[in-house]
Image (tube, rainbow, N blue to C red):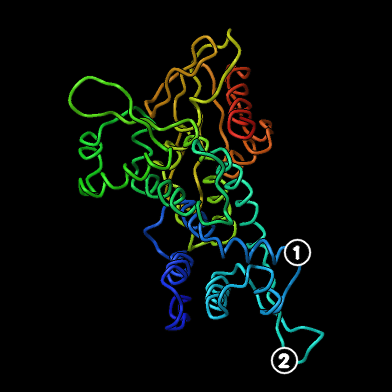
Amino acid sequence: MSGAEDLQPGDDAASRKAVEAVDALSNPRFRAGEQVLTLLATPLNYMVLRVLAERPMRLAELRSASGLPAQTTLRGHLSSLGEIGVVNKRPTARMPYAVENELTPMGREILEVADHLGRWLRLAPGGPISLETGGARGVVKAFVDGWGSTMMRGLAAQPMSLTELDRDIAELSYPALERRLSSMRMAGLVEARPGPGGGTPYAVTDWARRGVVPLAAATNCERLHMRKRAAPVTQIDIEAAFMLATPLVGLSADASGSCRLEVEADPDQSRGEVGVLVAVEAGRVVACDNEPDPSPSAIASGSAARWFSAIKDGTAGLLRFGGARQLSEGLVNGLHVALLDP
């Protein structure tokens, strides 16, 4: 039985949608990283995880510490979080037949993702957004919809009009793309750019580009703890992440050349090595695309997990380098600074 089915008739519609968001963790339509981000966009889910990080609690204690939600609502959330392995129940030593709710290793990992997501939301163009208030829901949904529809991938490569997006993304109708683009614009993820012709080109904002960090953290969490239920990291995911992040990097003025940033083949998937080619001129990233180059100036390569750690912690030594190491290491360290210390 799903968490949504555990809700009682008196529960409000918002709570039902929140629990359904947790149930969506088993939805194969999600792309890498979306599932955990969707879970955290529901305030009560985040509150439950944050409170249980302090210590295991019985239902009454947890309800009091998380803002006194309706008991049936809280039970529904706990049921769904338990089904996916985020929360566990254990018997208490204090009272017979009583149980406590405790956070699992997956739950603690999701809280680390929440730290990255919260830090990103606090930098929102319209002012800080808190995961506790529910203001994050629409922003995270707009980001997830843009990522899942590959709109973010297209706009990361170059500014595009709605008509151009419609030509490139056959899976969604024009009205569906229009709704997503409107939500992304209102959330501060894209902005209009002047351009020739009748259509209005849109480009991703620098703030949207930095959303790669919570997305990568969520992807890493899913791969560690969800195993077969985790969405695979695809070629388009890797290309989109690099295309979003690399334009933020600044290098020394004497840095020039081309560097291939490469994610090694995943033994659990049929995907081979995937990467992008980054062109640098006078310390600026001037291009990032998936065009092949038989002889780039430099190469940086590693598994998806090593790339995440290298950028998150600034530990470029986790990766394998070739060619002009100063250029490749500079790009990796530059990604750390641009994304984690803007």
Of residue 82 and residue 61, the one placed in the foreground of this image is 61
Q: Which residue position is annotated with label 1?
A: 54
Element type where label 2 sits in the image: loop
- Residue positioned 69% across, 33% down in the render: 315
Q: Which residue is mark 2?
A: 97
Residue 115 x, y percent position in the rendering: 64, 49
Q: Where is the N terminus found, in terms of image quarters?
A: bottom left
Rendered residue at 35%/45% (across/down): 183
Can you say whether 55 is above or below 111 in the image? below
Residue for point 44% across, 72% down:
16
Question: As rendered, which of 56 and 327 lies closer to the eye?
Answer: 56
Quadrant location of residue 53? bottom right
Could you say where residue 214 lies in the image, as x and y percent from the top left? 55, 45
Q: 27 or 161, which is in the foreground?
A: 161
Residue found 77% across the figure and 92% down from its top: 96
Q: CA distance from mark 1 to mark 2?
A: 23 Å
Question: Residue 306's x, y, as percent?
Answer: 62, 41
Vertical comparison of 239 with 97: above or below: above
Quadrant in which the C terminus is drawn: top right
